[in-house]
Amino acid sequence: MGSWFEANLVSVLNGGAIGCLLFILAIGLSLVFGMMNVLNLAHGAVFLAGAFIGWRIGGESPTWGTFALAVGAATLLGLLAGAVLSAMTEPLRNRSHLDQALLTLGIALVAAELLSMTFGNDVRATNAPPGLDGTVPVLGTDYPVYRLFLIAAGLLLAVTAWLVVSRTAAGAVIRATVADREMVSAIGIDDRKVKLAVFAVGSALAAVAGVLGGPVYGARPGLDSTVLILALVVVVIGGLGSVKGALIGALVIGQIESLGRALFAEAASFILFGALAVVLVLRPQGLFGRADMAGAPR
Amino acid sequence: MSAPADIAAPAEGEPRKPPPVRVLVSVLAAVLLAAAPLFLAPYAISTLTRMLVFGLLAASLALLVGVSGLPSLGHAAYFGAGAYAAGWFAQNVSAQAPLSLLVAAFTGGFVAAATGWIAVRARGVFFLMLTLAIGEIVHQVADSWESVTGGSNGLYGIPATEVGGAAITNVGVLHWYVLAAFGGGFAVLWAVKASPFGAALRGIHDNEPRMRSIGYPTSLYKYAVFVVAGTVAGLAGGLLAAQQRLVTPADLGFTTAALALLAVIIGGARSLWGACLGAALVIFVRDSIGPSLDGHGPLLLGVVFILVVYLMPNGVAGIRIGRGKGGGKP
């Protein structure tokens, strides 16, 4: 067991880094859907926009200044994109999920196409900022510092999100809206503003995840749908509207993506589907979802 | 907060026309399609053949989306599975006429059976997410299983279909071959829709809890129609392999699924013929306008989706999931 762990340590750590990145991405998707019943298929496009912004501002080897600037710009752009998405889905409030999915899908296709027209079809790789671009020895293996930084950032964000959602007044409104949107608006809170705020913050997180993911994935066309699918699987496995579920789901999918690909190569896609199947058979509402939001009939 | 059941679309799929007129129109359409190779140029014939292939895919999706209320975002997976199976079979076993089509239909149905049991357990938005994820995972498999699928290069050099030892190379003859298979697949879909089973599916679309409470095993019915639609989509994939003689991962990718869904929506969702007409329109636009867009077809597709959702609320409302927004409620 010990030697197996040592042999696969790099894959396990990679999986942790991918998982933390997926968590930052999936938390917005999960809250927007859990609260507002809106399936936002444009979430992956926001991530890709963030990755391109990171490349545009920081170039191939960013300094700390340009890296911070890129994060700031991505945050602003994400907030704006979330506000636009919130406004565009508002007229569809009483329409079916399919209508909302088609609309956000249309937006995602347009956004992806505009990005590839602006930034071209090449892989835009970036490096980590100085100090994070080296490697450190971990149990006798050299490992990129940046990925350890990603793990730390993801866990920090997870704790922050959990504290905000479970311990603050704003978090109480968010949880109440997940539980019963009509009751929240009945006690005088404008649930459109809650939706706008969650959409904006969720999209900002997706865009920041794009900047952070740049040094791992490299900005390229097609990345948007890849990460969107992974985030959807994370949300389905973890349960909609749950911070804890998104974290656990993201860490599981991160390991499947990394360790699974390292050990089983061609079969990794089957493992992804297998994990989805096992979770949904045992717990149709996801690991931490509420039973009354479940997709499955009793 | 769930919408009352009675504002959902009426139980009857389409307004009833007098049967003789419908029969006449159908016969006329069949005769025109069959006679097309006699008066059309080869390029126009192969466009028409592509329309038939894509029309069969759209019609099988219409059975899921419009009739049964199962809006799948991953239906291209079964189309592509059938296409790969037919291509692989023709390359490695036999290119004799109906064999590769049977293999394609079986493979489409098999993959639908293997993945659909997960999807039909879900309702509402979960169904959308799961079918999207399943479609994307099958796409990844096609992309990475190089020993069978040829990876991202696709499966190329598929031999032409043979009938009695002679290869079909003439576009007109190929058109007749595709038309015959299209007729078979469409007849299956039509028979399912017109049967008591199809009536039960419409009932599930309109009000699943009520159908369940009067004793219908609704999950089993949804699973059955999912497999039937997957089988016919697989058959359409077999036709694609026969015509294109090249199968790439894009054929089971998300764009194909989105185009098929667009065809279904344009066609009014509940009508199998409508889906075929929608497919013809989509193929016509893709093949005639697409090349002038310089590879930016998805941009047009996205704009069309946005416009359809905003401007055709009734066209899209016909395929609302369950009862409006109450997708997550019992």
Image: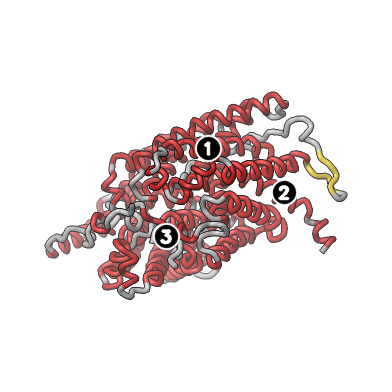
Which chain's residue wears label 1? A
User: Badge 2: few (under 14), some or many (20 or more) residues near its Cα, within 10 Å?
Assistant: many
Q: Earlier in the sequence, mark 1 or mark 2?
A: 2
Q: Quadrant of the N terminus of chain A?
A: bottom right
Q: Which residue is mark 2?
A: A14
Which element carries disc 2, helix, strand or loop?
helix
Question: The residue marked by circle 3 belongs to what chain?
Answer: B
Distance between mark 3 and mark 2 Cα atoms: 34 Å
Badge 1: how crowded within 10 Å, few (<14), some, or many (20+)? many
Residue B41 seen from this side: no
Say which element carries label 3.
loop
B234 relative to B319 in the view: left or right: right
Q: Measuring 39% from the left and 56% from the top, which residue is drawn there? A: B327
**Residue at mark 1 shares a chain with residue at mark 2:** yes
Q: Which residue is mark 1?
A: A203
Q: Nearer the viewer, residue B269 or A231?
A: A231
